[in-house]
Structures are given as C-alpha cells and as structure tokens.
Amino acid sequence: MTGTISEERGRKKGIREISPIDVYRYLPKTNCRECGESNCMAFSTRVVNGELSLSGCPPLYRDEYQKERQQLEELLDPPVRTVTFGTGTASVTIGGKYVLQRHEFTYHNPAPIAIDVDDLLSDEDLEKRVQQIEQFSYPYIGRTLKLDAIAVRCVSGDPERFGSTVKKTCDMTSLPLVLCTFDPAAMEAGLSAARDRRPLLYAATKDNWRKMAELAARNDCPLALFAPGDLPLLRSLARTLLESGIDQLVLDPGTFPEIGLSSTIRDLTAIRTEACRNFDELFGFPLLGVPMTAWAGGEIAEDVVKWQEAVMASLLLTRYADLLIMHSLDGWVLLPQLIWRFNIYTDPRKPVSVEAGVRECGKPGRDSPVLVTTNYALTYFTVDADIKAANIDCYLVVVDTGGISVESAVAGRSLTPDTIAKALESYNVGSLVGHRTLIIPGLAARISGDTEEATGWKVLVGPKDSSGIAAFIRDRWPGPS
C-alpha cells in the first residue's frame, strides 16, 4: 500500500479517479459472496461505479474490520455531504453528490419537493392542504411520483401560533417537515411540537445564527444557512457552524424571481463547482432552492406566477438544488418537476428498462392477440397502459433491446427478426395460443417481411402509437382461425 487514505483523498478529482483496487485493499478479501458478487474485486468495481454501497458487504461491518470500514467511508465520501431530516421511513436524504455534471456519474438522492403551509391557515384549510400534499401522486413508467415533505412557515410572527400549527401538521401527516422562521423563539415553539420528527430548521442568518445553532445542537436537527446574494457570508456562516460542531448543514444562497433568477442560478452553480471541482468543504453541503419566491415578485396574474414558479423549479433542479420548497399544488406546475427529477436522477449509463418476457394483459386465451414491444420502460408502460385502458385480453411479448425504444432499436439492430424469433422461442409463446399471428409496432414495419420468415408467424403491422391498438384490434385482428 502506498500513501495514506488522506493523501488519496487529496489526490482524487472525483469518484472516477478512485479505482477498484483502492476499494479492494480495505475489504476483508474473503470472497465470501455474501454481497452477491463472485468475489471482492467484483464488489469493489460495482462500488466504484456507484452500483453498490459498502453496506452490501456484511463482513465489513464486523468489529474486526471497523478501521477498514472507516477508511473506506472516508475514501468514498462525496464532495457534497449527505443530510437527512425526518425519522425512520418518513425521512429524506439530500446531497451526496460526487460530480458536477450528470454525464460524469450518477446523481444520488433525488431532490425532495416540499410544499408550504403557514400558520395563518384555518384548521379546515390546513387539513385540506396537507391532504392534497399527501394524496398528490402520478404513475410514471412503473413508479409512483409523489411529493416528499411539508414546509411549515411562520407568517403570523406569533411563536405560540406557529407551535400550534406545527403540532396540528404533525398530527395530520408523517411526511418530513421543514420549519421556516428566522425567529429563534418561534423556532423553539415549533421544535417543542415536532422534536421527535427531526425537522430541517430554516434558517440561520448572520443575525440569529448563534441561537439557531443552539436549537439545532440541542435537538439534533439539521440547519439551513441563509445568506441571500452573499456567497462569502454564506461560506463564513458554514465555517462558524462547523467550528461550533454542527455539520448537518444546508445552504441557501437565496432564490430571486424574475430578473434575479440568473444570479440565483449563477450562485448555485458557483457553490457546486467549488465543492465538486475544488473540494471546498465549506461549500460541500446540499443546496436549497425556493421557487415559491415567485409569489413575492411583481406579477399579479396568478397563472403567470404559477408558470414562473414552474420555470424556476425546473432550472433549480437542473442547477443544482438538492431540495425545493414550492407553493403551487396544480398538476401542471408539479408534474414537470417530478418527471424531470426522475429523469435527472436515473443512471445516464443505463437506459430505464423493464425485464424482458411475456406478459398477460387481462385474461388472454388461445385465440387472444400476441403483440410485440421493447423493454424500454417508457415504451412498455405506455403500451401496457393503453392495452389496459382498452380492456384488451392479449399477450405482450417484451423483447430485450437493452432498454431502447422501438424506432431506435430497429435502427440500432437490437429489435430484429432474429431477436423477435428468439423471444418467441425463449418464452414459449407458441404454446400459449392456437394461432400464429403476431402484431409488431408500426415503427418496426420495415422488418415485417423478414420477421415472418424468421419466425414462421404471420405478421401484422400495428399502429405507430399504442393509443391506436384498440381500434387496430377491433378492425384488423382476424380472431379465431
């Protein structure tokens, strides 16, 4: 072994410069396969690639390997620390970023979206809004996209009222909380009602940092630092809090609406660049963006304000917010953020795919249609949803195209007559039906003739869009033969 772990950390320019050997040298080297891999080197490779975590190696967590585990954890520490708020299953982790650009390495810990409530709401309106937040969901390519947290704001200026609102919110939901006030007295009242929920405290400023730090330390809560438009001050606050022993910090450099948005994006980019490229530990914390500041701008048309908030949220997710606080609950404002977040936080090296195979849709029988699609997740779930919406009983053959859509798979030769024939044989589709008629996607029309030769099945060219499957089956499916 050459050098120390600290020297290796000093040399590294990001996770990509850590090799599997760097990880392997601290593993137990027993090749026990408890991790599911064939040997420790294979496990090391997948850890470096971000596909597995150290917790996947049970022997590493035995007392005899405590030193090695600590060295590995230090080696693999991301430039942007992780911060967790909430408790148990009702908690969220933010930060944990290794790189500046997504194509360099997978982004971890998708940015939670918190929706605000305030202490001027009536009990009825508070309950209604909390229910809307909890019930907001959207099915998207096999996942259910939801909102993640609630930000309770002190608008009244009354600590007692704020504490009461926090308590009512805690009674209504188990979602993680962000307590929002610059008044330490109000924050203390809110904490007294939510102490066991470990909320994120928002926020410490140059004027109140000492009292906020005491509250955060006493209640073991993460603390957000707020220095709008002043990065040197934000960095100074981070240094002061770290020296005070508080290392669960979140940074908010201010979110400015309208013409101030460009400076907001510039500041967020500068902070994340310093953390990931120059390893500035004082900027190596999760970033908070507040798109709801759109409501404090000069625009008075409500729909325009919502549009501004949606635009701000999308930009902040891209550059480089780890947590958002929003106000709008309209689907057209929130769904683009949830879907954009989902796409940003997928592994750029791996297409989002589903397992290949044959699926039963409805209650198919011997005379039911047989359709073909690819295992690209968006394609599969769109086709599956359209089939179910039309109440069609059929078999859906999902061909392994490496997670590529139909048109690209045909062009890239991963959806070919041979791969379709292999799928039909591998999944024994012929034994499921009493006919030999196959429906392929309209975007694969050019391989229809060759597919007939390769499979021995009669091929029908279906619609280019799966929304047309219902009409196609009604008009073109020959039925029992």
Image (spheres, rainbow, N blue to C red):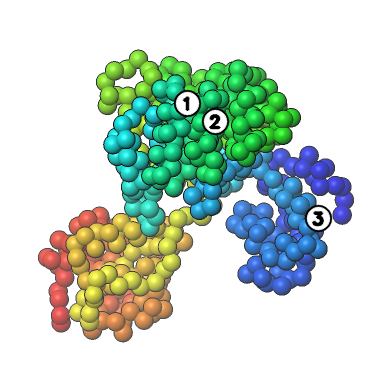
Q: Residue at x 74, y 47 (%)?
A: 74
Q: Is residue 313 in view?
A: no
Report, in whole angstroms, how far the alpha carbon at label 3 lies from the one at label 2: 39 Å
The quarter in which the N terminus is drawn is bottom right
The C terminus is located in which quarter?
A: bottom left
Residue furthest top as drawn = 298
Q: Relative to 12, does residue 29 appear above or below in the rendering?
A: below
Quadrant of res 356: bottom left
Disc 2 packing (10 Å; few <14; some 14–19; many ≥20): many
Provide residue 12's location: percent of width, then percent of height: 74, 42
Left or right, 474 with respect to 192, comes to left
Residue type, numbered disc 2: Glu
Is 85 or 191 nearer to us in this picture?
A: 191
Counting residues from the N terminus, which is met first, the one under dot 3 or under dot 2? 3
Q: Which mark is residue 67?
A: 3
Q: Amino acid at mark 1?
A: Pro
Question: Element at badge 1?
Answer: helix
Name the disc covering residue 159, or none.
1
x and y percent of residue 127 in the render? 32, 40
Q: Amino acid at mark 3?
A: Lys
Question: Measuring 60% from the left and 21% from the top, which residue is drawn there?
Answer: 208
